[in-house]
Amino acid sequence: MISRNALGSVREALSRQAAVALIGPRQVGKTTLAHTVADGQPSIYLDLEAAQDRAKLADPVLFFSNYEDRLVVLDEIHRVPELFPVLRGVIDHGRRHGRRTSRFLILGSASMDLMRQSGESLAGRIAYVEMGPVTVPEAIAANGDTGSLWVRGGFPDSFLETSDRRSLDWRRDFIRTYLERDVPMLGPRIPAETLERLWTMLAHEQGAVLNASRLATSLMTSAQTVSRYLDLLVDLLLVRRLLPYHGNAGKRLIKSPKVFIRDSGIAHALLGIPDYAALVGHPVVGGSWEGFVLENLLAAAPPRTVPSFYRTATGEEIDLVLEIPSHGLWAVEIKRSASARPEPGFHRSCEALKPARAFVVNGGSDRYPLGNGVEALGVAEMAALLAQLN
């Protein structure tokens, strides 16, 4: 059992809001965490993928009125989006009559943006908590095996498998299930083979600036279609689109986003990379490490942190720019080598942006100054530094 940091966030949110939405991709551990929360209090659990549980909500107002003093867990809420207005009515009715407000823990496998659109009628009544794959600090607390975490990714069943081969088999099954069952149920009808080819192309170019036209040519479709497919993968929390920073009007900046497969293990499975030895010799190793570090830092960053990257037309670059509320801009260069130093372009970019703090996050564990106000440190320590700002 891996202790997840989202547990504390969910409990805190439930203490102040009538409803809490726990968002994350499938198989990331949302249901396990929800049961952990529910076990500590009177509760009822409904899986809205199950026909028998959906049938219980034929008259949802009547059903919820019978459980006013319980936590109601609604798993896979995006299957029944028409429940959101009902929840608003139930919550407001309880408030008007001075009774204890019904509390709802809502689980969904779609992005926060989509959930907010569906749940806009719950404005002021709902809090959102995003739960991603297992992070470096969580892995260290569980078994300290951060090397396997990078190779296998952070989906718990993949990370905890008994061998790299079994982990790879699990991830391949996960990909197949998403393409053949989940995508058709969660989004528009898209040929599974086409979406898998796009997903694999993105894995080959992990961390590259998006060129939709070139991808469209390879897929023999239009750039607009590629963008629509990419939107779906982003909405399903499988792909991250990192937008460019545009705060410096005096520079010619790259305008296209960078694209990452969010879980490193899924990227490796798409590329057929079975273990660490194969990964370190693969051309994608640098992009894979960058994406792995990126996801860990964003999982630890304070709420409302805005991530981006900075790149000029002349090649000056900062891998990750964090706009952190009350703490200003932080510039982060990501290097795999424990002794790597930032490129000259990083220093020139920092001169242009004037960040409050600048870091090189590397594959080591020591923390030391590099000069010019730049610090070097490992992923775990950088994540802990960001978590302290919460």
Image: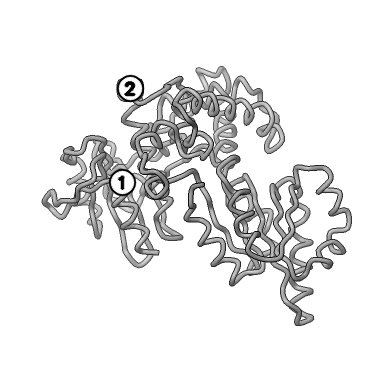
**Residue carrying label 1:** 379
Q: In the image, 39: left or right of 50?
A: left
In percent of width and height, residue 157 lies at: 53, 36
Kind of residue at disc 2 = Ala
In percent of width and height, residue 39 lies at: 65, 59
Kind of residue at disc 1 = Val
* Residue 185 figure quarter: top right
Q: Residues within 10 Å of mark 1 (few under 14, many from 20)?
A: many
**Residue carrying label 2:** 277
In percent of width and height, residue 349 lies at: 22, 47
Using the image as rendered, state which of residue 170 and residue 58 is in the foreground: 170
Q: Is residue 200 visible?
A: no
* Residue 49 figure quarter: top right
Q: Residue at x 52, y 23 (%)?
A: 216
Disc on the earlier residue, 2 or 1: 2
Q: Residues within 10 Å of mark 2 (few under 14, many from 20)?
A: few
Q: Residue at x 51, y 19 (%)?
A: 217
Label number found at residue 140 = none
Q: Residue at x 56, y 61 (%)?
A: 10
| Residue lying furthest bottom | 98
In percent of width and height, residue 51 lies at: 82, 42
